[in-house]
Image (cartoon, rainbow, N blue to C red):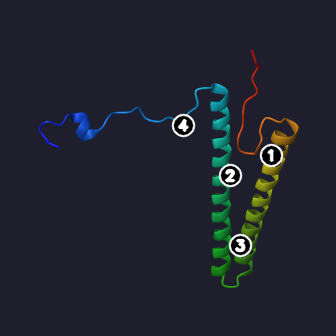
Amino acid sequence: MNLLAATTQDIFGTIKPPVSTIPNDPAIAVGSLISAGIQIFILVAAIAMLIYLLLGAFEWIVSAGEKEKLTKAQLKITNAVVGIVIIIAVLSVFCIVTVNILQISTSCFSFTIPTLSP
C-alpha cells in the first residue's frame, strides 16, 4: 500500500467508543454495586486477618521465651482465627438469607433488586 495514498483510518483504524461494563438498568447496576462491595469486603477482611495472623506468628518467634510476649502473640493469633470464623459465619448467614429466605439472589454474590413489573 502506498503510504501517501493511505487515509488516517487505514493507518490508525476506526475510533470506537469504550465498552462499558455498567448496566443501563438501575436495578441491575445497584445489584452489581452491592456484589462488588461484598467482594471487596471479603478481600479486605481476608487480607487483614492474614496480616494479623502473621504478625502474631512473628511476635511468637521473636518472643524469645518471655511469658508476657508469648501470651500477647498467642492472643493475636487467637483473635485472627476468631475473626476468620466470624467473617465466615456472617457470610453464611447472609447467603442463607438472600438466597433461601428473601430469594433476591441465585448465588451469594450476584443480586437483582426486586422491582414492580408494569
Q: Given the image, on which type of amino acid does mark 1 rest?
A: Cys
Q: How many marks?
A: 4
- Secondary structure beneath dot 1 equals helix
Instruction: State which tag comes first along the sequence, 1 or 3.
Output: 3
Depth check, front residue: 22 or 11: 11
* Labels 2 and 3 touching (C-beta < 8 A): no
Q: Is residue 101 left or right of residue 49?
A: right
- Secondary structure beneath dot 4 equals loop
On residue 95, the disc is: 1
Instruction: State which tag comes first along the sequence, 4 or 3.
Output: 4
**Which residue position holds label 2?**
42
Instruction: State which tag comes first along the sequence, 2 or 4.
Output: 4
How many residues crowd around disc 3 within 10 Å: few (fewer than 14), some, or many (20 or more)? many
- Mark in the foreground, 1 or 4: 4
Distance between mark 2 and mark 4 Cα atoms: 22 Å
On residue 73, the disc is: 3
Furthest residue toward left: 4
Depth check, front residue: 52 or 7: 7
How many residues crowd around disc 4 within 10 Å: few (fewer than 14), some, or many (20 or more)? few
**Which residue position holds label 4?**
21
Distance between mark 1 and mark 3 Cα atoms: 33 Å
- Secondary structure beneath dot 2 equals helix
* Labels 4 and 3 touching (C-beta < 8 A): no
Q: Looking at the rendering, in which quadrant would you find the C terminus?
A: top right
Distance between mark 1 and mark 4 Cα atoms: 25 Å
